[in-house]
Image (spheres, helix red, strand yellow):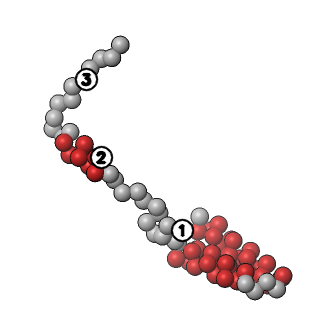
Amino acid sequence: MRLVRAGFAVWIFREAWVTGEWIMLVLGVVFAMQAIFDIGCCGAAGCAVPRSDAYKNQSESSSGQEVIYEEVK
């Protein structure tokens, strides 16, 4: 993904130079900074979703306990 952002930055810089649309340099700088620092829209965490309390309680309470299954017909 880092190379894609770097590619976008180079392409945007080139387009800004060729067309003379210098405001596009801002977008090019944004993509270049994302490529240099390896960050995306969500930052370095990569949009990690924290575990819910229900999952934590379930995994803690089930350790060492016998599971009872019931057959459903």
Mark positioned earlier in the residue sequence (1 or 2): 1
Mark 2 sits on what residue? Answer: 55
Which amino acid type corresponds to the residue marked 3 in the rendered image?
Tyr
Task: Specify the label residue 69 is tagged with.
Answer: 3
Q: Residue at x 41, y 57 (%)?
A: 49
60 left or right of 21 in image: left
Q: Quadrant of residue 34?
A: bottom right
- Check the image and report above or below for 13 versus 42: below
Q: Quadrant of residue 16?
A: bottom right
Q: Secondary structure at mark 2?
A: helix
Which amino acid type corresponds to the residue marked 1 in the rendered image?
Cys
Mark 1 sits on what residue? Answer: 41
Q: Residue at x 30, y 46 (%)?
A: 55
The Cα atoms of the two marked residues, 3 and 1, are separated by 44 Å
The Cα atoms of the two marked residues, 1 and 2, are separated by 27 Å
Task: Specify the label residue 4 is tagged with.
Answer: none
58 left or right of 2 in image: left
The Cα atoms of the two marked residues, 3 and 2, are separated by 20 Å
47 left or right of 11 in image: left
- Check the image and report above or below for 66 versus 12: above
Q: Secondary structure at mark 1?
A: loop
Q: Residue at x 73, y 81 (%)?
A: 24
Which amino acid type corresponds to the residue marked 2 in the rendered image?
Tyr
Q: Quadrant of residue 31?
A: bottom right
